Amino acid sequence: MKILIIASNYPYSGHPASGIFNERCAMVLQELCDHIEVVSPRPYVPPLLSSLVPRWKAYSSIKEYESRNEISVHRPASPVIPYVAGSFWFDRGAFFRCRQRIRELNDKVRFDAIISFDLLGAGGIAWRAGQDLGIPACGWATGDDVLIPPSPAYARVVIRALERLDLVFYQSQELMAKAADLLGTTLDRLSNKRHMVLPRGIPAPPLLARSAIRSRVRAELGLSEDQVLVVNIGRISREKAVLELVDAFSMAIARNPRLVCLLIGSLPAFDDSNAVKEKLEKTPGTRERVKLLPACSTDKVAEYLCAADIFAFASYHEGMPNSLLEAMAMGVPSVAFAIPPVLELEGGTGALVAVPPFNSALFSQAILHVAESAANRTDMEKKGKARVMERYMMRKNMASALDRLAPLTGLQKCKVG
């Protein structure tokens, strides 16, 4: 099967973590398919404006074409006029800018189908391109696109994608229920031929010399073996409840002096790192034991997880929390706020500790409870890893998506699972 992938964001030199899971999905699809190409519109801001804002300056470094991990990534420029007609530039405007490139690629490749990674920034391009080329298009509802469209205009973009894509996959049951709400119907009335819960999942955890890596990384951090390392890895964002997480860390540290906490993923031009720094500066006792570290490579993330004793995840809302899945797959006992996808992930198995949202005091108590019981951590390690490996492996789930897509293309099912 030859697949065109539409992604609203994809890693680039100025922001290597942007769309990192889109890239990981593309890499798995590359193994499963005969051929793939990626189209990811790049925001174009005039040079004078790009010099004024760090984020816009980073956009100016995006290349129109590059090969990443042997995958061709095409980035047609899509003009961005800040605060003006945002939904147009996400939707029809982006398609108009991408259409010629997509047609040229199709002339060479002859795609069988299109897959989009999200419905807001990529879904509109995907279904329009599918109609233009006469091939089926499917898309994933990944989170913010369906949960909280930022305005009625953006919601209409998502609704059109839900109505016109040939298949829609959802990261969680909650997302499919929200989609039904947007469409003015109920979950049980959505066609199971077009709508299905299928998390994109995560790649299989790397095979590492975990004990040796744990000792090395903890030595680099200046930690003794009796200290308990709590980590959070991901976007440093208010929407990820990062300030509540700092409060929880502060309360936990006050009661257990062995705790050390890391917030990993800082990119000040793109996130709320400065707000976290200000909060830490106001609490000297916490400042010494809670460290804010920059975003890092996938390999380094795995090393931090080897060194960790507890993973803390405190997001307000998620499609399906990939960083949490990664931590659990690596066998790190995890604490998270009990938002719907976290409860779906836990599934009554005891694979993680789910805390009523969004109470920092209760979150702190959960961290302390897990920290004080090595036996409990060992049990959670086994259950968490088993749960993720059973239901959330990317290769298996991408193969399932291709199996669902294949009949629409007239091709046989994907044989790799």
Image (cartoon, helix red, strand yellow):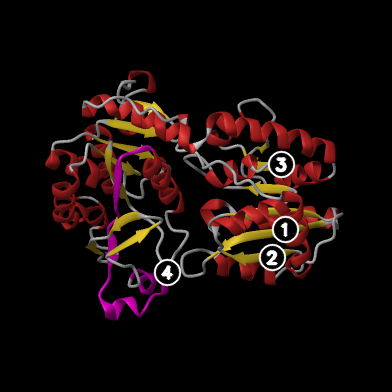
N-terminal of the pair, mark 3 or mark 2, is 2
Give the residue number, with chain letter if any, for mark 1. Answer: 261
Indicate which disc residue 14 carries. Answer: 4
Residue 289, magenta (yes or no)? no
Q: Name the image quarter holding the N terminus.
A: top left
Q: CA distance from mark 3 to mark 2?
A: 20 Å
- Residue shown at the point (46%, 36%) measured from the top left: 395
Q: Secondary structure at mark 4?
A: loop
Q: Residues within 10 Å of mark 2 (few under 14, many from 20)?
A: some
- Could you tell me if the residues under marks 1 and 2 are in contact, i.e. CB atoms within 8 Å? yes
Query: Marks 1 and 2, Cα distance to the nearest angstrom?
Result: 6 Å
The amino acid type found where label 4 is placed reads: Gly
Work out how far the residue at label 3 is from the one at label 4, CA to CA, in angstroms.
33 Å
Between the C-alphas of marks 4 and 1, the distance is 27 Å
> In this rendering, would 334 be left or right of 151?
right
Q: Which residue lies at the image location 51% right of the left edge and 52% below the top edge? A: 239
Query: Could you tell me the amino acid type at mark 2?
Result: Lys
Q: Quadrant of residue 59?
A: bottom left
Q: Is residue 72 visible from the viewing direction of this image? A: yes
What SS does tag 3 mark? Answer: loop
In primary-sequence order, the first of circles 1 and 2 is: 1
The magenta stretch spans which residues? 32-59
Q: Is residue 258 left or right of residue 179?
A: right
Q: Secondary structure at mark 2?
A: strand
Query: What is the spatial separation of the Cα atoms under label 2 and label 4, in whole angstroms?
Result: 23 Å
Q: Give me the disc on residue 333.
A: 3
If you read the primary sequence from the N terminus, does the residue marked by circle 3 or circle 1 appear first? 1
